[in-house]
């Protein structure tokens, strides 16, 4: 009911929408951040959950702050 009565704003799902407004930021990211990740200077974690049927649980756990890294739902392996 709070979502209907109040306002809800979600960002981060479609970040490419911002690329048109700020094309230089993507280029700067590739030039500056990717080498740091490749060298190991910046470390990241992924919390991988297998199965499309788990999406609801993963979204809920992200909203509750239960993840220590990027939440990924693996729906198929190639």
Image (tube, rainbow, N blue to C red):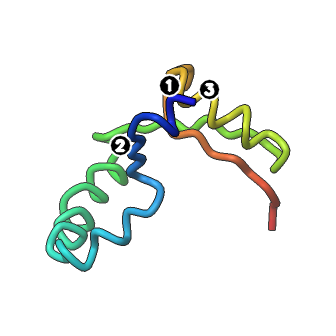
> Is residue 30 left or right of 47 when viewed as pictured?
left
Q: Would you name the residue on which mark 3 appears?
A: 61
Secondary element at image label 2: loop
Secondary element at image label 3: helix
> Is residue 1 left or right of 23 when viewed as pictured?
right
Q: Is residue 61 above or below residue 78?
A: above
Q: Where on the picture, by quarter, is residue 31?
A: bottom left
Q: Earlier in the sequence, mark 3 or mark 1?
A: 3
Residue at image coords 27%, 67%: 30
The span from disc 3 to disc 1 (Cα, nearest Å) is: 11 Å
Q: Where on the picture, by quarter, is residue 49?
A: top right
The span from disc 1 to disc 2 (Cα, nearest Å) is: 18 Å
Residue at image coords 18%, 67%: 25
Q: Return the residue nearer the eye: 55 or 28.
A: 55
> Is residue 44 left or right of 58 when viewed as pictured?
left
Q: Would you name the residue on which mark 2 appears?
A: 40
Does the CB distance between marks 3 and 1 fall below 8 Å? no
Q: Earlier in the sequence, mark 1 or mark 2?
A: 2
Residue at image coords 37%, 70%: 16
Q: Is residue 52 above or below residue 41?
A: below
Q: How many marks?
A: 3
Q: Would you name the residue on which mark 1 appears?
A: 68
Q: Is residue 30 above or below residue 4?
A: below
Residue at image coords 51%, 39%: 4
């Amino acid at each position: 009911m709070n979502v209907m009565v109040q306002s809800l704003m979600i960002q981060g799902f479609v970040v490419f929408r911002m690329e048109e407004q700020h094309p230089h930021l993507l280029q700067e990211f590739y030039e500056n951040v990717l080498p740091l990740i490749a060298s190991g200077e910046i470390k990241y974690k992924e919390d991988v959950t297998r199965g499309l049927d788990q999406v609801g649980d993963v979204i809920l756990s992200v909203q509750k702050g239960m993840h220590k890294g990027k939440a990924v739902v693996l729906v198929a392996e190639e």
